[in-house]
């Protein structure tokens, strides 16, 4: 139990001491890849990721071992959300994602 | 008397030309990208402060990039160009690179040794330039075990104007104590489209401000404050393990470029 609390504390510490970062690019084949990370270089593997349209989640996934998610590009406007917890969310508009 | 005078003039001229140091540029105008994009690099062998002579590059032995510990060869992407300095033009190269992945992209170029007639030696500057996409650090502090290398202790792309840069001079991973390091400011805007150097930004009050020479400490470390935004080159002279090329002395140098950003 102690161990669990300690690891949670460490996890929170690393999340809150550093800012969350996400960068996305259009693969040019109808898919988009988003990469997540933190300003201290820590991995974003397992961090929640979602696509929102009109404020609703239309796709949800977790960042891969390489801190990446690749998804089919939605046909209308969307926002990619890297969700590492409160205060650590990054929003990237689909219209800002280029090749 | 005339003869002595001539000799003095020639000697002074030779001395002056060696005062302005050679720097291998591995230049792209912005090292801190907000998101992934295709960047253009210029590979020019010049004197970045005074720009009094652009050398003809003898070729490139190696050119590659490292991102998230993955090495990609880029030598095939080099294209020959002629680069126009303020006094002459020289053979140079350009390349373009899709810096799409987040994190650091660590470029390393080893040019073919250049024969410097004035000094009767060859010069080879193993050059590093590090760019970052989106602010997540990945490879900037990697030690590559190069023959001559400056390993940064400060992110070379994340320095405010007035901030400082710290590095360690190494050869095959071993520190080089008291290495002599030349420091120069890229005193020009680089016209990326026309492959041309712009006019001087600042004037040096005296020659020792053109190429500033500093020394590493006993642990091979040095720190230098960057008083002005723009690009600064740090070149540790003759620290490489190769000492001879084609029967002549070789100065195998370690060079790193850092960029200070204006606070505005």
Image (cartoon, grey):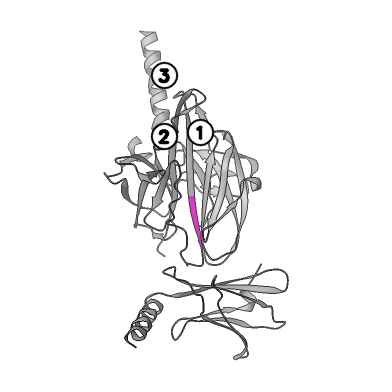
Which residue is disc 3 drawn over?
B10
Magenta span contains residue B6: no
| Identity of the residue drawn at 39% across and 28% down | B16
Magenta span contains residue B135: yes
Residue B31 has which mark?
Answer: none
Label 3, label 1: how far apart the Cα atoms are: 17 Å
Residue B171 in view in this figure = yes
Q: Earlier in the sequence, mark 3 or mark 2?
A: 3
Q: Residues within 10 Å of mark 2 (few under 14, many from 20)?
A: many
Q: Earlier in the sequence, mark 3 or mark 1?
A: 3
Circle 2 chain = B
* Residue A97: percent from left, percent from top: 63, 73
The reply to whether callout 3 and callout 2 are in contact (CB within 8 Å) is: no
Which residue is disc 2 drawn over?
B20
- Which residues lie in the magenta part? B129-136
Main SS category, magenta section: strand
* Residue A64: percent from left, percent from top: 56, 75
Q: Do marks 1 and 2 share a subunit?
A: yes
SS class, disc 2 = loop
Circle 1 chain = B
Which residue is disc 1 drawn over?
B53
Task: Return the residue nearer the eye: B137 or B241.
Answer: B241
Q: Quadrant of residue A4?
A: bottom left
Q: Earlier in the sequence, mark 1 or mark 2?
A: 2
Task: Return the residue nearer the eye: B41 or A16.
Answer: A16
| Identity of the residue drawn at 29% across and 40% down | B178
Above or below, comparing residue A55 to residue A43 in the picture: below
Q: Residues within 10 Å of mark 3 (few under 14, many from 20)?
A: few
């Amino acid at each position: 139990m102690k161990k669990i609390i300690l690891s949670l504390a460490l996890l929170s510490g690393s999340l809150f001491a550093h800012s969350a970062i996400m960068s996305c690019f259009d693969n040019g084949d109808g898919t988009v890849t988003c990469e997540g990370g933190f300003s201290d270089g820590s991995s974003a593997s397992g961090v929640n990721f979602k696509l929102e349209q009109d404020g609703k989640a239309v796709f949800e996934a977790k960042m891969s071992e390489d801190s990446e998610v690749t998804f089919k590009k939605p046909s209308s406007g969307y926002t990619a959300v890297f969700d590492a917890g409160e205060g650590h969310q990054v929003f990237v508009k689909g219209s800002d994602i280029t090749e | 008397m005339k003869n002595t005078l001539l000799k003095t003039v020639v000697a002074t001229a030779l001395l002056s030309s060696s005062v302005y140091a050679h720097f291998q540029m591995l230049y792209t105008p912005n090292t801190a990208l907000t998101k992934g994009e295709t960047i253009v690099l210029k590979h020019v062998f010049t004197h970045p402060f005074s720009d009094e002579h652009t050398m003809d590059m003898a070729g490139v032995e190696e050119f590659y990039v490292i991102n998230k510990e993955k090495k990609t060869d880029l030598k095939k992407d080099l294209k020959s160009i002629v680069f126009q300095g303020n006094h002459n033009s020289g053979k140079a190269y350009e390349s373009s690179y899709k810096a799409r992945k987040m994190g650091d992209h660590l470029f390393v170029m080893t040019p073919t040794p250049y024969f410097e007639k004035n000094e009767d030696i060859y010069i080879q500057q193993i050059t590093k330039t590090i760019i970052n996409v989106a602010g997540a650090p990945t490879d900037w502090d990697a030690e590559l075990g190069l023959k001559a290398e400056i390993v940064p202790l400060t992110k070379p792309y994340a320095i405010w104007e007035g901030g400082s840069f710290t590095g360690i001079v190494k050869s095959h991973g071993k520190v080089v104590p008291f290495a002599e390091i030349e420091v120069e400011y890229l005193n020009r805007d680089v016209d990326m489209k026309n492959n041309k150097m712009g006019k001087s930004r600042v004037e040096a009050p005296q020659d020792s401000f053109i190429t500033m020479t500093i020394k590493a400490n006993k642990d091979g470390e040095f720190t230098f404050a960057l008083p002005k935004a723009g690009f600064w080159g740090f070149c540790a002279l003759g620290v490489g393990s190769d000492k001879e090329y084609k029967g002549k002395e070789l100065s195998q140098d370690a060079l790193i470029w850092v960029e200070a950003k204006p606070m505005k």
